[in-house]
Structures are given as C-alpha cells and as structure tokens.
Image (cartoon, rainbow, N blue to C red):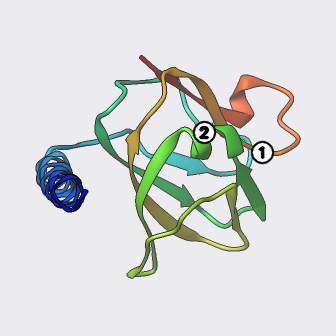
Amino acid sequence: MKKILLFVAALLVTSEFAIAKNLKGLLHSRTTLEPITISVGKELAAKPYKLEAGKYYKLVLKSDGSREVPIVGAEFFRNIWVNQVSINDIEVRPLGLDGFEFDDEGEIELTFVTIKPGTYTLGLPSAKSDRERAIFIVE
C-alpha cells in the first residue's frame, strides 16, 4: 500500500510540473484581439471574433465615458480561464466573472485562455441587436 501511495504522489507531482510547464509556455504566446470600444451609437464589434480553443488571448475593453454601461457575458466567462484582469494598472486574478461596468472613461485589459468551443457573447444586458454585443466563436 505504501508503494502505491508513493507512486501516486510521484505521479501527481510529475503531472503538476508538466501542467505548469505547458501553461507557462502557453502564456508566452498570446494573440491580441481587436479592442472593444464602448461609446454611444457605436457598435461593440464590427465582426465576430474567431478564436481557437486552448489558445491564449488578450482583449482590451475601452469606454469613452459617454455613457454608464454594464458589459455582461456569464456564459463567455464560464467557458474561458481568466488569467488576469487589469484596471488602471491594478492586476486582478479572479476565480470567475459575470461582467464589468464602466461608470466613466476607462480601460480593462483581459487575458484569458479559451476552454470550450461554442459561440458566446459579451454585451449590454438589454442588447436588442448584434450592434450591442461582441460575438466570440471558439472552434
């Protein structure tokens, strides 16, 4: 029994090391996406974002302060691994998100790894058209 436990412990340590090494390599090859600009009368994204599952991305959301606006996307956030959210040079490493709210002019930088293929959106909670959402297609 002791040998089995030692074997399992060694396997876990080896697996953790391999995962950490692969994640470290992944986080050095990031794709920067076209930013989302939040402004009265302007669409959030001109076209859908086409992403690849298992890849690392950076997305910047910018508000010009012309309106107070929440941006939601619970399904999107549940199907990505959020590495970091940066707001005014403050870095946050959250366990999960549902959305953001801009009360004034500002910028949010989000870095993440896509996990599950599917079609997801970020947008206004009351979005009535695709102009008020950004669509992410993860393949």
Q: Image point 39% across, 39% down: which residue?
A: 34
* Front residue of this view, candidates 84 and 54: 54
* Front residue of this view, candidates 11 and 118: 11
Q: Secondary structure at mark 1?
A: loop
Q: Image point 14% across, 58% down: which residue?
A: 10
Using the image, determine if residue 93 lies above or below residue 49. Answer: below
* Quadrant in the rendering for residue 83: bottom left
Disc ID at residue 45: none
Name the mark nearer the viewer: 1 or 2: 2
Label 1 sits on residue: 124
Please provide percent x and percent y for residue 48.
Answer: 52, 22
Q: Image point 21% across, 62% down: which residue?
A: 2
Indicate the quadrant containing the C terminus: top left, top right, bottom left or bottom right: top left
* Front residue of this view, candidates 69 and 118: 118
Q: CA distance from mark 1 to mark 2?
A: 13 Å
Q: Is residue 65 visible?
A: yes
Please provide percent x and percent y for residue 62.
Answer: 52, 58
Please provide percent x and percent y for residue 136.
Answer: 53, 28
Indicate the quadrant containing the N terminus: top left, top right, bottom left or bottom right: bottom left
Q: Image point 39% across, 49% down: which residue?
A: 112
Q: Could you tell me the amino acid type at mark 2?
A: Phe
Q: Secondary structure at mark 2?
A: helix
Assess disc 2: are there few (<14), some (14-19) or many (≥20) residues with their C-alpha within 10 Å of its C-alpha: many
Disc ID at residue 76: 2
Using the image, determine if residue 117 lies above or below residue 30. Answer: above
Q: Which label's residue is closer to the chain start, 1 or 2?
A: 2
Please provide percent x and percent y for residue 132.
Answer: 73, 35
